[in-house]
Image (cartoon, rainbow, N blue to C red):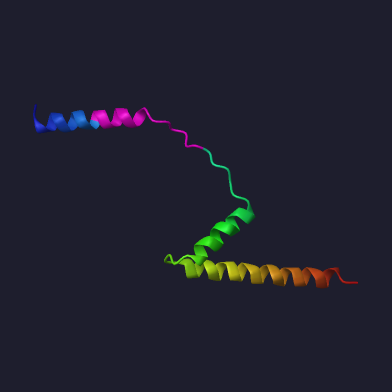
């Protein structure tokens, strides 16, 4: 066999193998906000690159939530 026919045979074989796979990915259940917060805080506490940014994002989210609670309490006051 020549190199061209070997390459063609390998391509056909690889294509047929990939066609046999499951085309539908497995569905995963989405995380609740509490679960996502736990994952994010674990990443923020680690020494991974970018963990400082995760910590800052969590801090900013906490600050925004606290501000919104204060504004809601002012709006609901008599």
Q: Quadrant of the N terminus?
A: top left
Report the residue that reaches farthest toward the left: 2
User: Residue at horizontal 10%, vertical 33%?
Assistant: 3
Residue 35 at x, y = what percent?
60, 53
Q: Quadrant of residue 68?
A: bottom right
Q: Nearer the viewer, residue 37 or 57?
A: 37
Q: How many marks?
A: 0
Was residue 17 drawn as part of the magenta stretch in this picture? Answer: yes
Residue 32, percent from left and from top: 63, 51
Q: Which residue does the image show at 55% across and 63% down from the upper left?
A: 41
Residue 29 at x, y percent in the picture = 58, 43
**Is residue 15 depicted above or below 34 in this figure?**
above
- Horizontal side of 41 relative to 4 (left or right) equals right
Classify residue 52 as left or right of residue 70.
left
Please tell me in which quadrant of the rendered image residue 60 appears: bottom right
Residue found 64% across the figure and 68% down from its top: 62
Q: Residue at x 83, y 70 (%)?
A: 75
> What span is colored magenta in the figure?
12-26
Task: Classify residue 14 as left or right of residue 63.
Answer: left
Magenta-colored stretch includes residue 70: no
Q: Quadrant for the C terminus, please.
A: bottom right
Above or below, 50 against 19 in this view is: below
Is the residue 42 above or below the residue 73 in the image?
A: above
- On the image, which quarter does residue 70 sit in? bottom right
- Report x, y in % for residue 23: 43, 32
């Amino acid at each position: 066999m020549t190199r061209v026919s070997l390459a063609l045979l390998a391509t056909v074989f690889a294509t047929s193998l990939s066609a046999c796979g499951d085309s539908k990915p497995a569905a995963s259940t989405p995380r609740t906000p509490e679960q996502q917060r736990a994952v994010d805080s674990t990443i923020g506490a680690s020494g991974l690159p970018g963990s400082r940014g995760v910590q800052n994002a969590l801090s900013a989210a906490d600050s925004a939530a606290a501000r919104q609670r204060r504004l809601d309490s002012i709006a609901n006051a008599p």
